[in-house]
Amino acid sequence: MGSLLSISDIKDDVKFILELASKIKAGEMEEKPLEGKTLAMIFEKSSTRTRLSFDVGMHQLGGRAIFLSSNDLQMGRGEPISDTAKVLSRFVDGIMIRAKKHSDVEELSKYSDVPVISGLTDFEHPCQSLADMLTIKEHLGDWEGKKICFVGDGNNVCNSLLLIAPLLGMDISVACPKGYEPAEEILKTAKEYAQENKTEITVTDDIGVALENVDVVYTDVWVSMGDEAESAQRKIDFAPFQVNADLMALANDGAIFMHCLPAIRGQEVTADVIDGPQSVIYDEAENRMHAQKAVLYYYMKD
Ligand code: CP
Ligand code: NVA
């Protein structure tokens, strides 16, 4: 069955997982499909939504989740990731991990006998983009022919959106300052997906160009976890990319505003936008749980 470290890992099943998520959300799911199953949740970084949504989601599917802070695990004292993976595999049926380094999650997955699900690394945030796409479908009716614009840092959240959008028939643009573009490796793969699905990808520092014909405006923090040392410079570099009412006016009428949260009002987005009528941020947060229940079912059901 493999692991979910990148949207590319579910390239051919993204639609299936999202349809399953809609059914689960609508209550069209057998009772307790993961009864007796346990998910270990390793966190090397802070979390509100990811921790809660996986924990409550496992419970609702009839299983249980165990929170493991890397500060308390022997892994935090230097126990090899390979040993951690092999030992955890003897106890649990799946491992969810939020890690500082994507390569550490790849290593965990390599040595694990049970599925590993990423709850964010420095490179991708696949469960977030699944929840985002569920939210877009609910608000816009479909993905096909729609366009999303990610404004800000070409970070983990942006990378997963770049991969998932073309797989669902959406165009995607990224408006970012020079030097903060998404990873080359991601762009290369995303462009292949776009070619296969006849969609468009644009990366530009011209906000006007990026916002042309856009149905979804998405942003994220300027300073991600791990980038704190660059905080002062980033606040200067990203200032022109703040999502405010003037920027929203460049998008289509009826466009929605999205943010993975946590947000800093007054930095990447103004309060009138994030708390305004176009914002769907709380649906988006709730959908983390519905999307991840589908992921848990997909990877852990016998
Ligand atoms: N969006 C998201 O992953 O939130 P948390 O950091 O609170 O888990
Ligand atoms: N890009 C942000 C997302 C937080 C959910 C970070 O990595 O900190």
Image: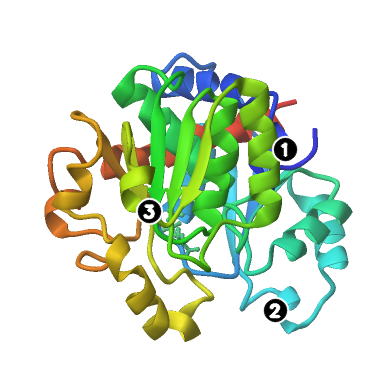
Give the quadrant of residue 106: bottom right
Q: Position of residue 6 (x, y in %)?
A: 67, 45
Judge: label 2 CB < 8 Å from ligand 1: no
Q: Of marks 1 and 3, which one's residue comes earlier in the chain? A: 1
Give the Cα distance between marks 1 and 3: 32 Å
Secondary structure under the numbered disc 3 in the rendered image: loop
- Does residue 284 lie above or below 227 as drawn? above
Which residue in the structure is indicated by mark 2? Answer: 76
Q: Position of residue 73 (x, y in %)?
A: 69, 73
- Does residue 286 lie above or below 116 as drawn? above
Quarter of the C terminus within the rendering: top right
Q: Of marks 1 and 2, which one's residue comes earlier in the chain? A: 1
Give the Cα distance between marks 2 and 3: 43 Å
Which residue in the structure is indicated by mark 1? Answer: 9
At label 2, the amino acid type is: Gly
Badge 1 density bin: few <14, some 14–19, many ≥20, Cα 10 Å: few
Give the quadrant of residue 254: top left
Residue at 42 percent across and 57 percent down: it is 205
Give the Cα distance between marks 1 and 2: 27 Å
Residue at 20 percent across and 67 percent down: it is 266
Tell me if residue 300 can be seen: no
Judge: label 1 CB < 8 Å from ligand 1: no
Q: Position of residue 196 (x, y in %)?
A: 68, 23
278 or 52: nearer the eye? 278
Which residue in the structure is indicated by mark 3? Answer: 206
Q: Is residue 41 left or right of residue 116?
A: left
